[in-house]
Image: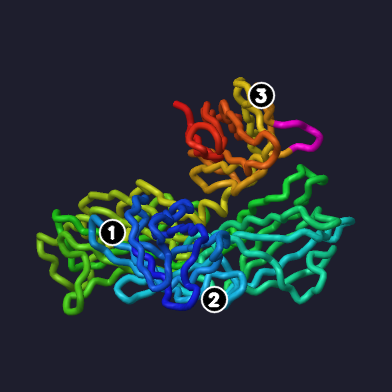
Amino acid sequence: MTVWTGDVVGGGTDSNIFMTLYGINGSTEEVQLDKKKARFEREQNDTFLMEILDIAPFTKMRIRIDGLGCRPEWFLDRILLKNMNTGDLTMFYYGDWLSQRKSKKTLVCEMCAVIDGEEMMEWTSYTVTVKTSDILGAGTDANVFIIIFGENGDSGTLALKQSANWNKFERNNTDTFNFSDMLSLGHLCKLRVWHDNKGIFPGWHLSYIDVKDNSRDETFRFRCDCWLSKSEGDRQTVRDFACADNEIRDELEETTYEIVIETGNGGETRENVWLILEGRKNRSKEFLVENASRQRRAFRKGTTDTFEFDSIYLGDITSLCVGHLAREDRFIPKRELVWHVKTITITEMEYGNVYFFNCDCLIPLKRKRKYFKVFEVTKTTESFASKIQSLVPVKYEVIVTTGYEPGAGTDANVFVTIFGANGDTGKRELKQKMRNLFERGSTDRFFLETLELGELRKVRLEHDSSGYCSGWLVEKVEVTNTSTGVATIFNCGRWLDKKRGDGLTWRDLFPSA
């Protein structure tokens, strides 16, 4: 990884720099770039060796600085990534300030990946419409933030600052916010909303949030109808919502399917092939592939052919019928009496769900449609957006056990992030009114609501080092999905203390065997 700092006065920085990388196959966690040996100085390029998960090809990069140090601003020119195994190059161009005072007045930027001169993502703008509920005390004076999640990653934190209404988020009011020059997230699936609990009346009852992708002219609704409040409801100020469009999807009238057919070496055909797709909601009409002898011919031995098919929405595809149909008034050579279909792959283009059929079958040639073969789906790959949209809110019980050694307890503010197969909770504070938490030998219980996380993979526990005695010895963390009763234990047995052990005040904990 090579980072170029721009040749402008004051372009170098003393701030800490953080990077998140996104690719077709996922994203990395935010990592801090090592700033030693006078890196990130004016008109300088700095090279790092980094080991990350294989998520290539890359789509975008997010860079964040913390705005600290004697020189809190930075002029970032560009960044180059080189895969040391394959030699593949990916460029990210910015050419502007990361600063609270200059240019865009932001400490965070997103850069589109450029591979062989081609941008890997499209640009768009989003309009966010927020509806506050019409109940007593629904409005809030707090500062509100959101993160939008889609098939192409997430938006990062967006502050809802400038609305047409001078007094935002009042009872029964609708506030609109515009975010321009953003990388498109594709089909939206989830939204995280929270506030900082500041102001005279911080409690907030949110009705819904609409997010419109202006380039696609699509609007996605996220229904809330609950409190974000420390004193109302379940006293949570952070919420995750799946897109309500999963209800609309059930009523989807028409969509496009991509059909990829692999012909095996056991027999090719010059004849026509027809298919009918069977879904949980509907059955498709017949899709006829008329083979051609003079034009580009399909279904040759060892080849793959791709077609698109418009149909009513079928729901999850369960099976398909395949027929091998002779054309009229044509002599059929003996070698073409059977066609070897090896695999068929069907992709629902609207949501990206993929259905695999491992056929490996010889289909005889017939002159009537009543002869066909039926294949059951072998494997289904559900897209991230489709999976998230189908999730429901779940409450998780978090039990934190503090160690027994002298000084094991902490007075600091404690935060947890739970990671699962379906995403994470975001950073949540573990706090209760009128209780002295995390004392030596104590066990403290908390409840967090979020969209169902799936199999739990990691817990990140951290504190802010505040208070008279901030050092903390954590014995273990236990997380239970209250809807299923499944508990996962994360052993720790280490200090989170700047003055003990390795000096870290955070730990990544993994499930115990």
Q: Secondary structure at mark 1?
A: loop
**Front one among 403 and 287:** 403
> Which comes sooner in the sequence, label 1 or label 2?
1
Q: Secondary structure at mark 2?
A: strand
> Which comes sooner in the sequence, label 1 or label 3?
1
Q: Nearer the viewer, mark 1 or mark 3?
A: 3
- Dominant SS in magenta: loop
Q: Which mark identifies residue 83?
A: 1
Q: Secondary structure at mark 3?
A: loop
Q: Nearer the viewer, mark 2 or mark 3?
A: 3
Q: In the image, what residue occupies the spot 63% across and 67% down?
A: 211
Q: Quadrant of the C terminus?
A: top left
**Front one among 10 and 506:** 10
Image coordinates of residue 278 in percent, x first then y, are 43, 55
Q: Which residues are magenta?
A: 432-437
Image coordinates of residue 505 in percent, x first then y, are 56, 39
Q: Are marks 1 and 2 in contact (CB under 8 Å)?
A: no
> Which comes sooner in the sequence, label 2 or label 3?
2
Neighbour class for label 3 at 10 Å: few (<14), some, many (≥20)?
A: some
Q: Which residue is mark 2?
A: 181
State whether residue 127 is above or below residue 364. Answer: below
Q: Are marks 1 and 3 in contact (CB under 8 Å)?
A: no
Q: Are marks 2 and 3 in contact (CB under 8 Å)?
A: no
Q: Does the segment drawn in magenta span residue 436? A: yes
Image coordinates of residue 138 in percent, x first then y, are 84, 57
Q: Which residue is mark 3?
A: 440
Q: Which mark identifies residue 411?
A: none
Q: Quadrant of the N terminus?
A: bottom left
Q: In the image, what residue occupies the spot 40% across and 71% down?
A: 78
